[in-house]
Image (tube, helix red, strand yellow):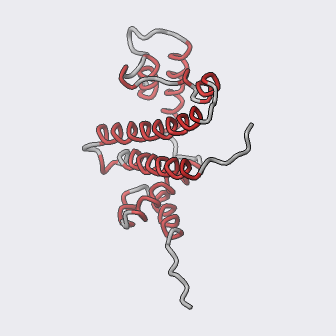
């Protein structure tokens, strides 16, 4: 492996794209809250696909650089994990519909193939539905959500928006936002 750092002209746009993605992910979380019931379907899909597209831009920017400096096609394709790529244009798959069926406690959709992936995703949906009946117990998930909401509230100068979240998330998000105070420059 090569030990040279990412060139600064590449690093900065990659950081920008990742920052945009984080903001889009925060909006996905925001639109899952009960006070956003009127447009959650539209906005969660918009922001989730925006985030995916933005990360694709970051990936392709890095891939173009790797290609520019002579990385072999096979290595580049391996790093891009092309076997994992699925097109949104094809719409939800049998596995996606089975996952939803498991989440909702329904049978696997009629006509769905019974491959291992479909069965696995149905089982995952069942387990996730079961966990959803209990309070969130993963502190890392709560902390991540609080960080995203606190960052967004601070950037938008809208700390009042944090009142719309569950109390434990709102309290953590406020602490995050408070830590982001920009210190005044020292006077000489």
Point out residue 21 in the picture as x, y percentages from the top left corner: 45, 46
Q: Position of residue 7 (x, y in %)?
A: 60, 49
Q: How many marks?
A: 0
Q: Residue 107: x percent and y percent?
A: 42, 17
Residue at 38% over, 36% down: 49
Nearer the observer, 12 or 42:
12
Q: Nearer the viewer, residue 5 or 106?
A: 5
Judge left or right: residue 50 versus residue 115.
left
Which residue extends farthest left? 38
In the displayed structure, 36 sits above or below 104; it is below
The quadrant where residue 66 appears: top right
**Is residue 131 positioned above or below 98 on the image?**
below
- Above/below status of 112 relative to 32: above
Judged left or right of residue 107, residue 135 is right
Residue reaching furthest bottom? 188
Quadrant assignment for the N terminus: top right
Nearer the observer, 151 or 5 = 5
Percent across and percent down for residue 131 are 53, 37
User: Horizontal placement of 139 versus 51: left or right?
Assistant: right
For the point 55% across and 85% down, the residue is 186
Horizontally, residue 118 falls left or right of residue 106, namely right
Instruction: Between residue 73 and residue 27, name the one nearer to us.
Output: 73
Residue appearing at x 56%, y 91% in the figure = 188
């Amino acid at each position: 492996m090569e030990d040279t750092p990412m060139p600064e002209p590449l690093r900065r746009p990659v950081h920008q794209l990742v920052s945009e993605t984080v903001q889009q992910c925060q909006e996905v979380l925001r639109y899952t809250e009960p006070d956003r019931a009127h447009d959650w379907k539209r906005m969660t899909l918009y922001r989730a696909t925006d985030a995916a597209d933005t990360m694709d831009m970051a990936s392709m920017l890095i891939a173009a650089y790797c290609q520019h400096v002579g990385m072999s096609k096979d290595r580049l394709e391996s790093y891009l994990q092309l076997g994992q790529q699925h097109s949104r244009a094809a719409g939800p798959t049998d596995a996606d519909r089975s996952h939803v069926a498991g989440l909702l406690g329904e049978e696997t959709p009629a006509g769905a193939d019974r491959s291992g992936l479909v069965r696995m995703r149905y089982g995952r949906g069942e387990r996730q539905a079961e966990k959803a009946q209990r309070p969130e117990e993963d502190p890392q998930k709560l902390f991540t959500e609080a960080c995203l909401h606190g960052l967004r509230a601070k950037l938008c100068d809208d700390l009042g928006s944090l009142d719309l979240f569950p109390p434990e998330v709102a309290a953590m998000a406020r602490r995050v936002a408070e830590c982001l105070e920009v210190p005044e420059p020292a006077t000489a």
